[in-house]
Image (cartoon, coloured by chain):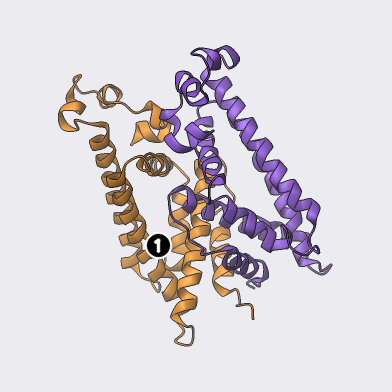
Chain colours: A orange, B purple
């Protein structure tokens, strides 16, 4: 994950993982025979870490004080993904999703990650409305818009800059999107 | 551009460009001696094509009927970037921006592309408001939000799916973001 996140896809190889991890030459090849097996293992590890972070946020709920809760919690989690040590994971995720396009099995694995993330973030967003008059279709669409916006924020981190100054700023932008009214 | 967009960064090499272009072995190395020179040339070509498309849109203005104008024009241009032959260019752009992180000169070149794109899209968005009462700071922030959202939409294209169904849908989402009210 560290190699992929700092050196990119071309910087990842079995011998380099051996050297980076300080294990005897051939160890990585023994456990992950192919490049695909190596990428799958890295992808699964990234997903495991991401889901743990997101689940923590979901458990805290939106009424708890402090911690990761509500849209500010989502904003804080996104901002964390732009600072080390999480930024390397964010970059590795971008690299691996691009690499996955070359392999249907990898592609499906990482697509499942996206579906999980979406479901969790959608719940946070639905909680935010807390209004039975807002139709599900509106919540769905706003959730997609917010998550797409967040994907763009993470892209800015990966590319070495940030379009938002801090979590409070990001939270404000997210809530602006959530409360925008429908056009006739 | 085609190799980078279809095979990814690891699929790009001087001999492969020779074969893909059907030119004698060594031709690509003769014109672009290093990998960096090759990436710069590809990046410049992508920028040239992008700027031509965006300038066309800007020239048409926001009152013209048909063609690329206003927020619908922006939406149409974004949707085009998700379909071939433009999708390969979009994917190549993502690959090259990730590769650029390894080299400061490449990084600056592609950062300049981003600044140009931002300035142009900001003008389209400012035209949309067409209201002297809206402060510049609000327009700036909305422009950043819309462009970040568009970056997320393009990320979905690159990853093999689409978060929006068509240009009219994307246009509606963009205008929802533009008209969202400020929180107190």
- Helix, strand, or loop for circle 1? loop
Q: Position of residue A53 (x, y in %)?
A: 33, 55
What residue is at 67 percent from the left and 61 percent from the top?
B142
Q: Is residue B119 left or right of residue B132?
A: left
Looking at the picture, how far across and down is residue A29, in whole percent? 19, 27
Q: Nearer the viewer, residue A101 or B179?
A: A101
For residue B78, above or below residue B102: below
The residue that disc 1 covers is A68
**Residue A164 appears in view:** no
Find residue A120 and report its image quarter. Answer: bottom left
Identify the residue at image location x=36%, y=31%.
A3
- A119 above or below B21? below
Q: Position of residue A67 (x, y in %)?
A: 39, 62
User: Could you say which is closer to the camera, residue A50 or residue B177?
Assistant: B177
Quadrant housing residue B183 = bottom right
Please report, as a chain letter, where disc 1 is located. A
Task: Count neighbours of disc 1 (C-alpha within 10 A) and say few if under 14, some if 14 to 19, many if 20 or more.
Answer: many
Q: Is residue A12 left or right of residue B157?
A: left
């Amino acid at each position: 994950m560290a190699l992929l996140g700092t050196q990119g896809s071309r910087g990842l190889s079995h011998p380099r993982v051996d050297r980076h991890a300080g294990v005897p030459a051939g160890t990585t090849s023994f456990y992950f025979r192919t490049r695909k097996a190596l990428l799958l293992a890295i992808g699964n590890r990234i997903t495991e870490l991401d889901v743990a972070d997101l689940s923590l946020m979901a458990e805290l709920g939106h009424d708890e004080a402090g911690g990761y809760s509500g849209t500010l919690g989502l904003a804080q989690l996104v901002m964390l993904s732009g600072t080390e040590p999480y930024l390397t994971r964010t970059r590795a995720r971008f690299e691996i999703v691009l690499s996955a396009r070359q392999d249907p099995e990898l592609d499906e694995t990482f697509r499942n990650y996206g579906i999980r993330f979406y479901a969790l973030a959608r719940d946070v967003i639905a909680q935010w409305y807390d209004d039975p008059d807002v139709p599900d279709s509106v919540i769905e669409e706003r959730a997609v818009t917010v998550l797409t916006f967040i994907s763009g924020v993470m892209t800015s981190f990966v590319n070495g800059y940030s379009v938002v100054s801090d979590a409070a700023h990001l939270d404000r932008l997210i809530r602006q999107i959530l409360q925008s009214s429908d056009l006739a």
